[in-house]
Image: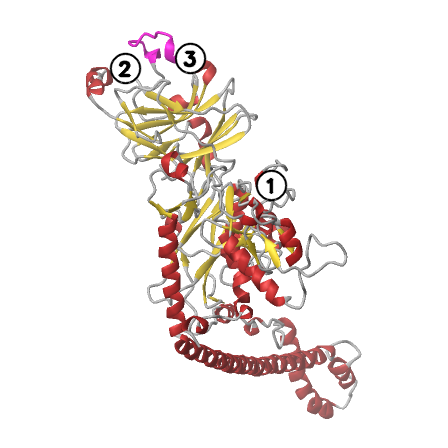
Amino acid sequence: MSRRSSLLVPMKSIERELICPICEELFTQPLVLPCQHSVCHRCVRELLMPNHDDSLSTDAGSESSNPGSPRARVPSPSTEKLERLVRSASLRRSFGARDQWAAVVLCSRVSMLFRNFTLESIVERYRQAARAAVAIMCNACKPPVQEATKSCMDCKASFCNECFKMNHPWGTPRAQHEYVGPTTNFRPKVLMCHEHEMEKVNMYCEVCRRPVCHLCKLGGSHANHRVTSMSSAYKILKEKLSKSIHYLISKEDQVRTQISELEEMMRHTEENGQLAERRASEHFERLLETLQERRTEMLRSIEQSRSLRVERLRAQVEEYQGMLENSGLVGYAQEVLKETDQSCFVQTAKLLHVRIQKATESLKMFQPAATQSFEEFVLDTSKEELLLKELSFSGVPAPPVIDLSRCRVYNEGLIHWRLSEDTLPTDHHIVEFRKLGSEEEQESGWSASEPVFGCSTVLSDLSADSSYTFRVKSCRNRVYSPSSPEVTLHTPPAPVFGFLFNEKCGFSAERLQLSKRRDSVESVAGMSLLLAAERVQTGSYICLDYIIGDTGISHGRHYWAFRVQPDSYMIKVGVASDSKLTEWFHNPRDTSSPRYDHDSGHDSGSEDACFEVSQPFTLLTVGMGRLFIPKASASAAGDHSSRVLPMPQRIGVCLDYDAARVFFYDADTMRCVYERPVDCSGTMFPAFGLLGGGAVHLEEFITAKRLSYL
């Protein structure tokens, strides 16, 4: 046997390579994805465009709408659909080929895909081998139809010998048609570029790993990519593939040995798994036996104590019943009193008197013979229940611990956790959470996140102004660790409002510095403040530098949060009305007048409660590590005697435009420390005033890191 014949593989043995990973059937018009895998074009359409019609193009008459065309148009799938499929595939990526290939389909974020004609031909040859007994009939014969002996790739038809000669006369162009053995698979002779429909592909892009035409290289999407000629790519790839095939065949004995080892491992896995199940069952049976023994002993103790107490109380009842008139001791004593013989009376009455005295004393000092409480028999099993909940195999990782210092809830929920240093490696983690509130919400149970492969995750779609409980558990070899201790976080009171600082309205470039992203502003106590020192010493009013957000609010309820630098001298935070801002910033004012600015330069915060109607700002004072609550509403902070609170690490503001009220929060605990009415005329903007050195940093939005596919 020749070397070539020894390398031939029966068609039946390659069946698994010809199965679409989505529909799990033989490929039908397979498309090559950018990741170089293939999927039936019908499967791509059903997965990514379930509502799309059966045509591949809206132009039914175009070449690309023909299934036999070298180009197959597939409309771009929506990003939202792709992300949902990414999450779905990642959840099940290790549970079978069908789920694993769901992620592969997501690579097709292009408008057109090449058909895999080589794979299509192999599938057709496989079909022919499978139906060898079924003949392909001539398409040109008149009845009786003869069996076809040739198929013309140009005519896309099959012919018997006579019909082939008649339809392809010698000396005519049709005689140059390409023919093959009988087949039903007619593919185009050349591949056409999917970007330049009239151009044949004649190059291979080494960056994108796909065929391209010369126009793609000259000025198209592959202009800066490294390309090679199609013949060179054909030679190189064919050589690599041949070497790989020869290597696999030369390692046939090694592969068979490894298969035997794997089969042996499967047998041992079955045996060891069954043994582990039996041993675990024995441990639980011993635990149940121990619990049953303790249950019997403790119930027996309760029963014995109950019987003894009831017996004592019953005897005491009988004794007291004897004291009643005309019965028992009293009746007997009355009969003794009837005795007239003195010697006989004394003889009997002496002992009777002792008994009567004891009964009298018993009445004076009533004490039940036994207690009715069984408090000493109350059983506390909380520790044992916790131990049972934490009962796990020796190979299960220790439960994680949620790191509250790194967790926060803003537009979404960010949960961080840490693992113990001596814990076992983990496959992934699961975050469970539930909303606290009504009994119905409590009974709804825990919701679970997708598998998380790091030590943090972002949870979306949390309800506003709600408390949530979170816990985390680790997974190793599909066995879960006990859950972490639960933590509770409160969501903002309203949807989070996004904005940046506006450098065009009231912004003082001399004294305020904005970050490049415009999410931080810093007040610099420079020369201008030194020049104002004389006015400060005389108690005259000094000027605040104002800055507002670049986005306004005209309806609804909105929340935002920020951090004030701890060593800031004075910061005022709140809202401003655009209907008054224009006049405030652009009308000339007497800078020597105390009415130039509403801030007196001290940190009492009293101005916040008595703004003039004409002023556009509704503000709260923060500075030097303190939060100043106006006297009129000190009770809102829960302290009727003090207007000063420690400054929270994060401060939140909630504007209810429709209710015309503004609320100030400790953003770490979501506790409202101050609220007041506000004139919501026109559009309202987040507003800040800075005096002296200090800085304000807007809270950064929480965003999840998504996987991106090229």
**Mark 1 and mark 3 in contact (Cβ < 8 Å)?**
no
The amino acid type, in three-letter code, at marker 2 is: Ser
Image depth: mark 3 or mark 2 in front: 3
Is label 1 in a helix, a strand or a loop?
Answer: helix
74 sits to left or right of 348 = left
Q: Where is residue 681 in the image (x, y as percent from the top left)?
A: 52, 17
Q: Position of residue 23 (x, y in %)?
A: 60, 57
Find out whether residue 588 is within the magenta segment: yes
Residue extent of the magenta highlight: 584-596
Q: Decide: is 419 above or below 346.
A: above
Nearer-N-terminus badge (3/2): 2
Q: Mark 2 points at which residue?
A: 540
Seen from the viewer's position, the closer of residues 509 and 357 is 509
The amino acid type, in three-letter code, at marker 1 is: Ser
Seen from the viewer's position, the closer of residues 610 and 571 is 571
Nearer-N-terminus badge (2/1): 1
Nearer-N-terminus badge (3/1): 1
Image depth: mark 3 or mark 1 in front: 1
Q: Which residue is drawn at 36% across and 60% down?
A: 239
Tag on residue 8? none
Q: Where is residue 286 in the image (x, y as percent from the top left)?
A: 53, 83
Tag on residue 65? 1
Is label 3 in a helix, a strand or a loop?
Answer: helix
Is label 2 in a helix, a strand or a loop?
Answer: loop
Q: Mark 3 points at which residue?
A: 582
* CA separation in Å, label 2 and label 1: 81 Å
